[in-house]
Amino acid sequence: MKASLLLLPSFLVPLAAWAASANVAADAYISSANPTLNFANATTLNIGGGNSALIGLDLSSLPAGLTASNIQKATLTVFANKAFTAGGLDIAQVTGPWQESLVTYNNRPIAATPFQSNVPVSVSGSYVTFDITLLMRQWVTGAAANYGVEIRASVAQPNTAVALDSKESTSTSHPPVAEVILVSVGPQGPTRTPRTTGTYWRDRSNRTAGACGAS
């Protein structure tokens, strides 16, 4: 009786995840009430009442050669120094260049439709975290240029008014920061040694004798 060969497939070995940080490279708020003024040196990023915040991230601290599959999760956390009117925040990808020391409402960069909307902000002295996983994957692979994000009062709650800490804050000193959970996949493992299988039979005493070898 002929035996069959069972080939076990090769496999990928998952490695442990680890965290990396990306600090803010540039931040400023822009104001429709003061359309020609630049607020790059402000210690807060004011949002609401015609104001929105621009935040650029420095990704140079992340390992080189990352792929989208290496980014398990990415978040951007900001600190609400003051919540003047509780509500929600929208975050959108910025799709055009801007310069921190020159940006104003009049020359503001283009921003896409918000990719996360109405993220709650309720009290002063609290952190607000946005999920930027998909955008981070696009940035690290070059699928999208890294021009940062814009945070504004949510469309659902337009009266929201908050002041976030900027990187210039010296009192509470909680600038925006991105946290990235990285994962990797190890090299392909070897194919396991083929194993011989066959039909088992029992002798007249009902004892298992073994597998049939190849004839």
Image (cartoon, rainbow, N blue to C red):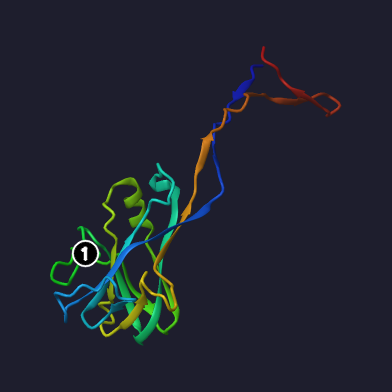
Residue 17 % position (x, y): 53, 51
Residue 12 % position (x, y): 53, 38
Badge 1 amino acid = Ala
What is the quadrant of the N terminus in the image? top right
Decide if residue 115 is on the left or right side of residue 36: right
Residue 114 % position (x, y): 27, 67
Q: Quadrant of residue 39?
A: bottom left
In the picture of the structure, the residue carrying the numbered disc 1 is 111
Q: Is residue 111 above or below residue 184?
A: below
Quick one: 77 or 176, which is closer to the camera? 176
Residue 200 % position (x, y): 72, 26
Q: Quadrant of residue 76?
A: bottom left
Residue ranking furthest to the bottom: 84
Q: Is residue 176 above or below residue 95?
A: below
What is the quadrant of the C terminus in the image? top right
Decide if residue 8 is on the left or right side of residue 36: right
As helix, strand or loop, the secondary structure at mark 1 comes to loop
Taking the spot 39% from the left edge, 44% from the top edge, the residue there is 67
Q: Is residue 213 above or below residue 165?
A: above
Taking the spot 42% from the left edge, 47% from the top edge, the residue there is 69
Quick one: 24 or 17, which is closer to the camera? 24
Few, some or many residues within 10 Å of mark 1 (<14, 14–19, 20+):
some
Decide if residue 81 is on the left or right side of residue 203: left
Quick one: 59 or 202, which is closer to the camera? 59
